[in-house]
Amino acid sequence: IGLDIGIDFTGSNKPPEEEDSLHYYGNANKKNPYERAILSCASIVANYDYDKLFPVYGFGAIIKGQGQRKANMCFNINFRDDPNIKFVENIIEEYHKCLGKIYFSGPTHFSPIINEIIELIKKDNYIFDYQILMILTDGMIDDLDETIDKLEKSSETKRKDKNEWKEVKNDEMR
C-alpha cells in the first residue's frame, strides 16, 4: 500500500497563527487537526508500506521568495525535487517547515494533485498494489468537475500486473 498526502494551504483555512486555523501552531502541547489526521492515518498505513516513503504535496499557497502572484496547486512540501518523506514523524517536521515558507491563498483545486499521483502510478518503478490519496482540506473544492474526471481516470490507470512485479521484485532480491 502506498500513501500520498495532499495538504490544503488555501486562505479559507486561516493563517496558522490564528487559534481557529486548521493549521494552528501556537500550542506545542496540542496537535492541530491536520497534524492529528496525518499522524493517525499515516501511522496505520505505514505498517503496510515497505519503504516508509510518503509523497506529500501542498496546494493553494504562494511560495515565498519566488515572485509568484498565483497560488501553486501542487508542490512538494519539502521543497525538494522528490516529494517523498521518509517516516511519518518527518512528515510533521516538513509540514511545520513548510508553514513558514508559504502564504495561504487559493483557490482549492484537487485535480493537479490527483494528476501527479496518476503520473506516479504510470512510472515503470511503481511498486504498490494499492494507492491511497489522503487530502486534508476544509471542505471547499473549486474544481469539482475536473476532480471527478481525474478520479475516474485514475481508476483506469494501468499498472503492472502481479506477475510482472514478481519478476521485478525477484531481480531486486538477487
Image: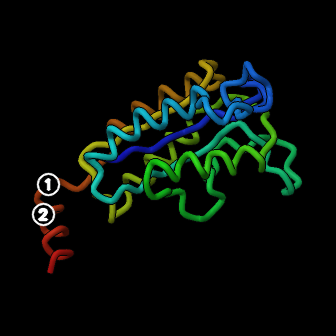
Q: Residue at coordinates 28% horizontally, 52% vertically from top-left?
A: 128
* Numbered-mark total: 2
Q: Residue furthest front?
A: 29
Image side of residue 88 versus residue 11, left or right = left
Q: Residues within 10 Å of mark 1 (few under 14, many from 20)?
A: few
**Image quarter of residue 155:** top left
Relative to 12, say whether 150 is above or below. Answer: below
- The three-letter amino acid code for the residue at tag 1 is Lys
**Image quarter of residue 45:** top left
Residue 174: give x, y in percent of width and height. 14, 81
As drawn, the label of residue 166 is 2
> Is mark 2 in CB contact (under 8 Å) with mark 1?
yes
Residue 8: give x, y in percent of width and height. 64, 33
Image side of residue 3 versus residue 140, left or right = left
Relative to 116, say whether 137 is above or below. Answer: above
| SS of the residue under disc 2 | helix
Depth check, front residue: 151 or 67: 67
**Residue located beneath label 1 in the image:** 162
- The three-letter amino acid code for the residue at tag 2 is Lys
Residue 149: give x, y in percent of width and height. 48, 30
Q: Residues within 10 Å of mark 2 (few under 14, many from 20)?
A: few
Q: Residue at coordinates 43% horizontally, 54% vertically from top-left?
A: 87
Q: Residue at coordinates 59% horizontally, 65% vertically from top-left?
A: 81
Measured Cα–Cα span from mark 2 to mark 1: 6 Å
Image side of residue 23 versus residue 54, left or right = right
| SS of the residue under disc 1 | helix
Q: How is the image coloured?
A: rainbow
Residue 41: give x, y in percent of width and height. 40, 34
Q: Residue at coordinates 87% horizontally, 44% vertically from top-left?
A: 69
